[in-house]
Structure formats: C-alpha cells, structure tokens
Image: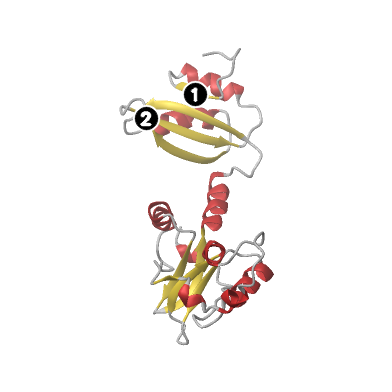
Amino acid sequence: MIVEQMMNTNILTLQPTHSIKDAINLLLENKIRHLPITNKKGHVVGVLSDRDIKDATPSNLIDNQQHDIYATPIEEIMTKNPLIGHPLDFVEEVATIFYDQKIGCLPIVSSGKLVGIITETDLLYKYIELTGAHQPGSQIEVRVPNKPGILFEVSKVFHDHQSNVLSVLVYPDLQNDENKILVFRVKTMNPLGIIEDIRKEGFDVLWPNMPGMTT
C-alpha cells in the first residue's frame, strides 16, 4: 500500500506568522493534534503539535497574566524543516520513519506542495484494518521452523477446514532464530478443530493455549 491511498487530503494549515492563539483555536475547533505550517507559496516550512503549544504556554492551573504569550508567532515554537513524505512512498516505509524518529505526523509533499498528511493515529487505524482485528474472529499463533514453504504447509489446515483467513503476520522467534511465529486472524469464533489439526501436523500452537487444552 502506498501513502496516497491512506493520507488525509483535507488539510488544515497555518502560516508561520499566525499566533499561538490562532493555532489553539484551529486545533480545538477541529479536534486535531498536528498542523503543517506552510509559507505563502504552499511549501511546508514547519510542523506544530499540541505538545509544542503546551510546552510554550502556561498551565491553566497557574494564575498569571502572560496573555502576550498567546500572541507569539508560531514560527517561534514550531518544528522547522520537518521530515516529509511523498504520495508514492510505501506505508511500511513511512511507519518505519514514525518509529525511528518518534514523530506524530508526516506532511506529504508532491512537486514541492503540501498534498496530504499522515498521523500516528492514521497508521494505527490502518494496522487494525489490515489485520482484521476489528472483525469478529479468532487469533491463532503458531511456532514453525524458519524454512521456505512453511506458510503453505500450515495454511493447508485452514483450507481443509474451509476457514477464511483474514490476515497473516510473521514475527521472529526471540527465543530461537531457527523458528518464526505465524499469527493468523481467522473468521471463526470456534477454532478448536483447526488448532487440533495444526498440532497433528506437528506444529506448536502458542495461542490459544489455555489450561485444559491439548498441548
């Protein structure tokens, strides 16, 4: 999946000369946490978050008269020269940027102009959609040898049960590099028959593995 397929194109933005008060009003009115900041040519010159504003303004619990703070131009508190993405970037690559750089949003730019934005919440929602976690079903975790063709061998069990697999994730086995963990999301509320047959094939089912279940 590419960024263009999931980015938000209904973009709210301000210019560096707008005040902190302008930014607060825009964030509150639209219930958002991040704003790309552009110049008059539409080029991204910064990013402003609700955390930037909280760090720059006094607490509501403190009685003070520092109202002039809210008139401060946002260019003084925004993150300048922020990281940007492109509409044709892969979502996986963008997620890595979020993880490595610990950012909350990424402006998406094409031909020098702002065309969209992605936030950490967008990535979370997309992850939920792609894994099928929001749909009724069961999760089955299986430890398998790390060798070619192993996914096909396990998948045959689901095929034999005519069970619809919503998603498959592959994780490393932190205890043994010679294994890996397959996590299946299956469209069934009673996976016991599937689990039994997976075990008959010689695979180790890690979840569900509750007291009283065959191991």
Q: Residue drawn 43% across and 80% down?
A: 43
Name the element at disc 1. Answer: strand
* Label 2 CA crowd tier, 10 Å (few <14, some 14–19, many 20+): few
Q: Nearer the viewer, residue 145 or 82?
A: 82
Is residue 6 at least partly visible in the picture? no
Q: Nearer the viewer, residue 212 or 61?
A: 61
Sooner in the amino-acid sequence: mark 2 or mark 1: 2
Image mark for residue 109? none
Give the residue at mark 2.
Answer: 174
Regarding residue 100, the answer to whether it shows in the image is yes
In this view, which residue lies farthest toward the front? 64
Q: Please tell me the numbered disc located at residue 206.
A: 1
Pinpoint residue 89: horizontal percent, then vertical percent: 40, 63
- What is the x, y in percent for residue 200? 48, 16
In the image, residue 175 above or below residue 49: above
| Three-letter amino acid code at the position of disc 1 | Leu
Residue 112, position as x, y percentages in the image: 39, 79
Determine whether, in the image, residue 2 is placed left or right of residue 145: right
Q: Are the residues at dot 2 and dot 1 in contact (C-beta closer than 8 Å)?
A: no
Distance from the alpha carbon under mark 2 to that under mark 1: 14 Å
The image quarter in which residue 2 lies: bottom left
Dividing the picture into quarters, in which one does residue 149 lie?
A: top left
Measured along the vertical axis of the image, is residue 67 above or below residue 118? below
**Rendering coords of residue 37 (x, y %):** 49, 76
Say left or right for 91 vs 176.
right
Residue positioned 57% across, 33% down in the render: 139
Q: Secondary structure at mark 2?
A: loop
Q: Is residue 180 above or below residue 80?
A: above
Residue type indicated by callout 2: Leu
| Colour scheme shown | secondary structure
- Between tags 2 and 1, which lies in front? 2
**Left of 32 or right of it: where is 90?**
left
